[in-house]
Amino acid sequence: MSESNTNKDSFTARLCGTVHFRPVHVVITSDYVKAKIAELKARFAHAGDFCFFTDIKNLRPILAEKALYSRNMALAKGLVKCDCASASVLNGTPPWVRDYARIYFAPKTPMLYRVEGIKHQQDEWPECPIPVYFVFRPEVVTLPGAMISNGNMGARDTVCRPASEEFFDALPFDDIFHRSSTWMNPRKKEIVACRHAEILIPQSVSLDQIAKLVFRSSAEKVLAERLADLPSGIDIEVDRNWFNAARAFLEKVDGRNLFVQNAQHNDRFVTLTANSDGKVEAKEYIYGITSWSGAKEVESDGICLEMPQPGETYAFLNGHRIAILN
């Protein structure tokens, strides 16, 4: 297949939502990726940080499978415990994309801004209460069948092609790695679309390709350690700069004191403590104008929250579990 036919068929697939191109050999090498990422790293801080974000509830299933699956595979296996995907965005994306594991070029995409954190009021976007990043090695782009998009797969003008050095070189990196405000920029729509550029891998990506996990706060990292066995041999980082951190989240735990960032009026904080006899004690706190109210004992029977194990205390913010305390 000639390069012109490959490009044409890939673009046809993008518009029609059906894969028309024949399988092609990935013509992008590890040596090229290493040199290219080094070149880009001199200009963009997150060059090479190919990443996927998900809610902490999905962390354990992904780690247990030792793979990041396509949306269709993850749903079929029942692995999606918190669905952070927007139905409206998915409806505008070609159906074949759901059979690919999708990895962004860099963190802090506009999509994350829409869904990140515990929302004070629900809106038309889904919620990713406690996000965590899986960060892949740059060589992920060399995997068999890899595709590259130059922007949002839900945008009509996006081009998605089999990974090649020629196409990679031609990507609009100034827009892909753009992270400052676009409020008054006449190219806002184009830049926002490019920020969602992706690497798409057929069906799944082995977690052998993982370089690190990144959490928003030390408290959320501790919660992850309680919920799942974090893999050894990779970096586990806490770096708020990877996130927007604009909505409520747990920043740290000091003994029994929990420090919540960005709390707002009427936010609801609940602790559930299971005694050794199995009885559960529930306390509720409500955020006022500037601070939390005192503890109010409530009946645990009327609270639709996950009950802790004996000897444990679970903490919830607006219905989302944010900590497990011994």
Image (tube, rainbow, N blue to C red):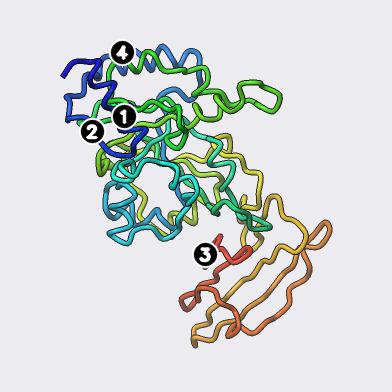
Q: Are marks 1 and 2 in contact (CB under 8 Å)?
A: yes
Q: Residue at x 23, y 19 (%)?
A: 5
- Mark pair 3, 4: CA separation: 49 Å
Q: Residue at x 58, y 85 (%)?
A: 301
Mark 2: secondary structure: loop
Give coordinates of residue 261: x percent, y percent: 68, 50
Gap in angstroms between the C-alphas marked 4 and 2: 21 Å
Q: Amino acid at mark 4?
A: Glu
Q: Residues within 10 Å of mark 1 (few under 14, many from 20)?
A: some
> Going by the image, does 7 lie left or right of 271?
left
Q: CA distance from mark 1 to mark 4?
A: 19 Å
Which residue has dot 1 on it? 12
Quadrant of the image occupied by residue 11: top left
Q: Note whether 240 is above or below 42 in the view shown.
A: below
> How far apart are labels 3 and 2 at the CA level?
49 Å
- How far apart marks 1 and 2 lie (CA) works out to 7 Å
The numbered mark, 1 or 3, whose residue comes first in the sequence reads 1
